[in-house]
Each structure stands twice: as structure tokens, then as C-alpha cells.
Image (spheres, helix red, strand yellow):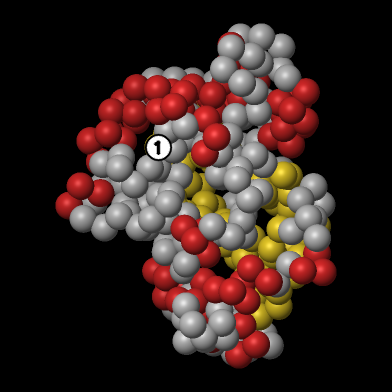
Amino acid sequence: MRVRFWGVRGSIPVPGTDTLRFGGNTACVEVSAEGAPTVVLDCGSGARPLGRDLLTRSGRDLCVLLSHYHLDHVLGLPFFDPMYAPSFQIRVVMPDPDPPATDLPLKHLLNGRFHPVRLPEIPPSVRFESIRPGATFPCGPIRIRSVPLIHPGGSCGYRITHGRRSLVYFTDTAPFAQPGEGLAAGRDPTEAESRILDVVRGADVLVYDTMFTLDQFITKMSWGHSYPEYAVALARAAEVAHLVLYHHAPDANDADLEEIAARWADHSAPAVSVAREGGAMDLEG
């Protein structure tokens, strides 16, 4: 299984000289495995370069998993070239606690007003499907387990398993314990943390929202994002092999992120890295 990062930012794309090393595109991660459809996690602005790259490949089966409908996670969808190429078969999975109404958020985005293409004009080779967060479902030989997260308007995380390898993608979520409680405080896990540990445990890679520093988090606890120290505590308790810090704040420049990378560079159990646009990881086996 191979993981590649096409967009690692939150909130809004931030192109410029201060974001060249880590990238300025918003959330989009590709997971590929031999003999399986390509999985696309979120369609932020990073979906545009991914789509162009996919056009050059032989594989034509895609499974797009949306975490939620905030603009930084869907603004690349109308510019995702495979959607308009009839040779592709694309399954777009959308989380919704009320599946019969699940296509409404994308109808608002693709309505001819915010983008020229309307949702009914998308080719029939693109199938939109709702899932209730907490459901488990297949994508070819890949098994996907979804889980509700903590974010304004709701968000959905995913565990992706192929053979003996697995990746967990948790973006746009607050910690599952208050400061001074649970894993980050060196205490027993809260009830919410115990449920999350059941999903994350033993993953090869955990991609986790760490938009804020700890000091920033204290002043923005209701924003639905997390911080590195919490992600590390969760990954350690879940015996994750590698933690990737993800969904960088738009105000975090390359120097800020290099400082965070240096802070965690020598950490083990888990190993910790900072997501970079264009970065890739190979999970053997």
C-alpha cells in the first residue's frame, strides 16, 4: 500500500514563497494498492493535480472518501478531471447521519451558481453514495471502516485496510478528551478515547489533524481541531507505527512547520513526521 499527499492544508489554499516546502493545497491524500481501486481521501484543492496525474495512468477505478463538506475538503471536486472522463468509474462516498438527504450539500456546491457544472450533469460513471459514520464497507479488496469525529457540522474518519496493512485518516477533529483528562494527561482513556482506540489500534500509519499548537488550541477549543501532543499520545496508546501530522493551519509557514518537524524528529513509538505536499510513504506487505 502506498500513500501520497497532494494537499496538506486546512481552511484555505495558501500558495506563496512561505509555503513552498510543505505546500499550500488543501486536503487530499491518495492511497493505492496493487489490484485495488485508488482511494482518494478528500477533494480539497490538492485534488486538481492528483486528477491530472491520474489521467496519465492505466487504472480507472477510484473510490473518493469525503470526510465532510467544508469548502477546504470539497473545493477541488469540480476541478477533478477524472470526473469528466467517461473511461473512469468513480464512487464518491459521502458521510451523512441521514442518508436520504446526503446529496444536498454537493448540490449546493454544484448548482450552476458557485460552479458552472451542475450535479445532474456529472457523467453517470460517477456514483454518489451515502454512508452513516460508523459503517464498514468494501472498496474492491480494500476494507474501509468509518468513524464519527468531533467537528462543527460533523466529520468522518476512515481506517483503510489492505491485506495486513492499514492507514487511519482523521482530519478535522477535536481531541477526544478535555485538557487534563485522558491519554494526553497520562491518565486512563476517556470513554470517547476508548472507542477511538478500537478503530486506530495497530495501524501502520495514522494521519491526524494537528492544525494548532497546544497554546493555540487552548484558545480555540471549539473549532474542532487538535494539536501534536494529543496526536502523539493517542498514537502511542494505539500502538501506531507512524504518525503523520496533518491539516496545517494557513498561517503556519515553512519555518513554523520545520520547527514542529524538528521537535518530533527523534520521537519513536510512534515515529512522527509532518505531512508535505508531494510526500509519499510505502507500506510494505
- Is residue 194 something one can see in this rendering? yes
Q: Give the answer, above or below, for where 284 lies relative to 202.
A: below
Q: Give the answer, above or below, for where 180 lies relative to 8.
A: above
Residue at 59% from the left image edge and 60% from the top image edge: 69
> Quick check: 143 left or right of 223?
right
Residue type, mark 1 in image: Val
Residue at 54% from the left image edge and 57% from the top image edge: 70
User: How would you rate the neighbour count of disc 1 (Cα within 10 Å): few for under 14, some for 14-19, many for 20 or more?
Assistant: many
Q: Position of residue 125 (x, y in %)?
A: 67, 85
Q: Position of residue 232 (x, y in %)?
A: 53, 24
Label 1, secondary structure: give it: strand
Quadrant showing the C terminus: top right
Q: Position of residue 17 (x, y in %)?
A: 17, 52
Q: Give the answer, above or below, for where 78 lies relative to 264.
A: below
Q: Quadrant of residue 137?
A: bottom right
- Which residue is tagged 1? 274
Residue at 26% from the left image edge and 58% from the top image edge: 15
